[in-house]
Image: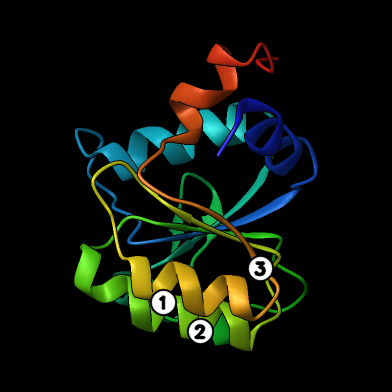
Amino acid sequence: MNDQFIKDVLTGTQTIALVGASDKPERASYQVMKYLLEQGYNVIPVTPKLKGGKTLLGQTGYTTLADIPGQVDMVDVFRNSDAAWEVAQEAIGIGAKTLWLQLGVINEQAAVLAKNAGMQVVMDRCPKIEIPRLGLQK
């Protein structure tokens, strides 16, 4: 996966569903969500903890990807590698364009499933690192 591919994914994305969002500021998912919001992305937190319309960083949360109204461009996965398969299936189900597996989240079967469904896949990377590295920071 080359830098141009990652750049194209990041510049072609507006709405990100962040699966495994946490309300704890010390957690990476919280820090990445905050950063992506600061970069102008629409970020939707997805976690069972946010059922009933609870919010995180001012954004309405959802318990599953299927609960999100409207189009999602990217599904950013902050779950363990084993959970990535199920998240990939859900991402395909909602018609997301990209499956992004965070640092340390590696699941080749999930990547193949998503690619075979026509999705772009980024694995074992973090947008909070890639955006400034590629000169895309706002």
User: 10 Å neighbourhood of mark 3: few (<14), some, or many (≥20)?
Assistant: many
Q: Earlier in the sequence, mark 2 or mark 3?
A: 2
What is the total number of numbered labels drawn onto the structure image? 3
Residue at 76% in and 37% down? 8
Q: Which element carries disc 3, helix, strand or loop?
A: loop
Residue 4: give x, y in percent of width and height.
71, 29
- Label located before the other in sequence (1 or 3): 1
Label 2 crowd bin: few (<14), some (14–19), many (20+), radius 10 Å:
some
Which of label 1 and label 3 is nearer to you? 3
Q: Give the answer, above or below, for where 114 lies relative to 131.
A: below
Mark 3: which amino acid? Met
- Which disc number belongs to residue 87? 1
What residue is shown with label 3? 119
Tag 1: Cα neighbours inside 10 Å, few (<14), some, or many (≥20)?
many
The residue under label 2 is which amino acid type?
Glu
- Cα distance between the residues tagged 1 and 2: 5 Å
Q: Position of residue 84 (x, y in %)?
A: 33, 71
Secondary structure beneath label 2: helix
Residue identifier under label 2: 90
| Res 54 label | none
Q: Nearer the viewer, residue 69 or 17?
A: 17
Q: Is residue 8 left or right of residue 87?
A: right
What is the secondary structure assignment of the residue under circle 1?
helix
Q: Are marks 2 and 3 in contact (CB under 8 Å)?
A: no
Q: Residue at x 34, y 41 (%)?
A: 30
